[in-house]
Amino acid sequence: MQRKPLIFSFAATLALGVLIYQVSFGYFEAAERSKAKGRLSLYRSSVVAALEQYAHLTQILARDTYVIEAAAGGDTNALNERLSAFSTQAGLDAIYLLDLDGLTVSASNFAKTTSFVGQNYAFRPYFKSALKGGQGRFYAIGSTTGVPGYFIADAVTGSDGILIGVIAIKKNFDDLETSWREGGEQIILTSQDGLVLLASDPKWRYRALRPLSVAKKESIRAARQFGGAPLKLLDWRTDERGRAVIAGEERLHLVAADLPHDWQLHYFASDDRAVARSWLATAVAVLAAGSLLIMFQVQRARRIGRALKRSEQEEAQLRETNAKLAEEINERKMAERRLTRAQNELERASRLVALGELSASVTHELGQPIAAMRNHLAAAEISPQAHASLTGHIEGLVDRMEGITRQLKFFASPQSEPFEVFDMRDGMNVAIELLAPNIEDVNAEIKFDEPVMPICIRGSRLRIEQVMTNLARNALDAVEDSLTPRLMIRIGQTEHDAWFEIEDNGHGLGQATLSEIQEPFVTTRASGRGLGLGLAISANIIKDHEGLLTAENAVSGGTVFRVTIPVTSRDERKGEE
C-alpha cells in the first residue's frame, strides 16, 4: 500500500516527460522546418539564376554578322576564333553553329579532340525546337564529350528572314553541385519526369524518383539524354509528415516545384537540433517534477511523524492512568525516541541543505559552458564553414564542465584540489574565449592590457578562471544597456602580490556594497537570468587562495572589480621568516 503512491508518482512523471517531449519536438521541428524553407528558397533562386543567366545569349548570337555569314555558307575559321573567345569570357562549355540538317559547322572547341565540328545533333530536342521558331532548352549528357550540361538554342535567319541554321550554347552546373556538397547539404534537382539531374551526392545522379513508363524510356533513349545510364530507382521514401528517408537517414523533406521546365528542387534537412532541444526541455521538466515529488514526500513524512507523535502521547497518557510505576519508564523511553528522531531529522536537514547548495552551484557554474555550446551549435548551423572548428570548441567546453563537476565532489568527500603554478594571462584569455558569444551578443569592446612578461601564481587554475569568468560575465551584464559597451581588463604584479582588474562602463554599484552583492542568491539581474551565486562563489575561491576581492564605482562611471592574490602562500612566507 505504501509503494502505490510512489509508483503512481513515477508513472505520472514519466507520462509528463513523454508529453513534454512530443510537444517540444513539434515546436522545435517547426522552427527547423522554417529555417529549411529559407535555405530552400535561396537554393531555388540560385538554380533559376543559373538557368536564365544565358537565356538571351543565343538570341544575340543569332543576329551576329559572323554567325549569319557562316550559316549562309561563308568562311567558318573567323567564327571559330570568335566563338572560342566568347565561350572563354562567358564561362561556357561550348558555343556552336549547326546547319539545317543538324551538322555542326563551327564551334568554340574546334581545336580540341572533342570538337563538335562535324558532329550531327539533329536528334536533340533543343535543335528541333529551334527549327520550329522557338528557343530550345534541354539538359543532357553530351554525346560527344560525355559531360552533362544545359543546352540553349535559337534559330539563325538570313537578311531575307529565311531560316539558315541554329546557334546553340552548352553550360554545365558543376559549380552548383560543388556548393551544395561543400556546404554539407543534401539536395537533388529533378526533371518533370522525376529523374535526378543534379545532386549533392554524385551517387544519386541519374536516378529515378518513381518508375518510368516504357514510352518515356524510349523517348529518353531517342534523345540520348543520359547516355548509357541505367536510370535505376533512387533508394528513398517519403511520408505524409513531410519527412523522407534517404541514404539510410531520416530527414525533413521540402520541395520547390515552381522551377522552369516543371523541374523540382528537393531539400533534405537534419532535425538533430530539434531532437537535442526537445530532450533538454524534457530533462528540465522531469527534473522540476522530480523536485516537486521529493518535496511532496518530505511533507508527507512530516505529517506521518506528527500523527505518530500524537498517537504516542495519547498512549502515554493512557499508561499513566493505569500504572504510576510504568509512567516514569515510558516517559524515559519516549524522551530517548524523541532525541533519536530529532538527531535523524537534523541529519536529513543537513543533507538537504548540502543538496540545495550543490544544485545551485552546478546550475550556476555549468550555465556558462552550456550557453557557449548552444551558441557554437547555432553558429555551426548558420555558417556551415564553422564545422571544422566546432569539435575543438565543444571539446574544450566539455573539459571545463568536467573540471567544474570534479570540484563539486567536496560535498561527497572533502578533498582539496592540488595547486599548480600557472600564468594568469592564460587564465584571462580562456575566460575571454569562453565568453565570446556573450561579448558578441552585447557588442562590447574588450580592451585587454596584457603584460609582456608572465604573471605567475600558485593556485587552482580552473577555480581562478571561474573567478575571471564570473567577474567578466557580471561586467557584460552591467553594460548591456550602454550605448558603447566597453570592458577594460588589466593584469599586473607587485613585490608580493599578483592582481587583475575588470572595469566596465555600466550602471555601477550605486548604493550597494560588495558585502551585500556577494551574498548567495542576491543578484541585480532580471528574473530568470541568474542565481546570484557568481560573486559568492568567487569570494570563497579567492578566500581559499588567501586573496582579496574589492569593488568600487569607477570615476568615469561603471564598476571596477580588483582581485589580489599573494605570489607565495602563508606557509611559504612563514618559512622565509
Image: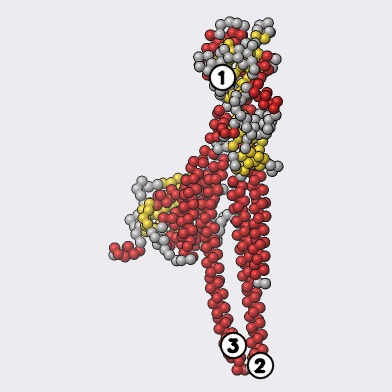
- Residue at 62% x, 32% y is 232
Q: Nearer the viewer, mark 3 or mark 2?
A: 2
Q: Which mark is residue 322?
A: 2
Residue 374 visible in the current orientation: yes
Mark 1 and mark 2: Cα distance apart in space: 118 Å
How crowded pointer 2 is (Cα within 10 Å; few <14, some 14-19, many 20+) is rated as: few
* x and y, in percent, of residue 225 in the image: 62, 23
Disc 3 designates what residue?
331
* x and y, in percent, of residue 564 in the image: 40, 57
Colouring: secondary structure
Of the numbered discs 3 and 2, the one sitting upstream in the chain is 2
Disc 1 designates what residue?
144
* x and y, in percent, of residue 279 in the image: 60, 52
Which of 462 and 82 lies nearest the eye of the viewer? 82
- Residue at 47% x, 62% y is 409
| Three-letter residue code for mark 2 | Asn
Mark 3 and mark 2: Cα distance apart in space: 14 Å
Occupied quadrant, residue 163? top right
Quadrant that contains the N terminus: bottom right
Which of 160 and 442 lies nearest the eye of the viewer? 160
Residue 485 visible in the current orientation: no
Quadrant that contains the C terminus: bottom left
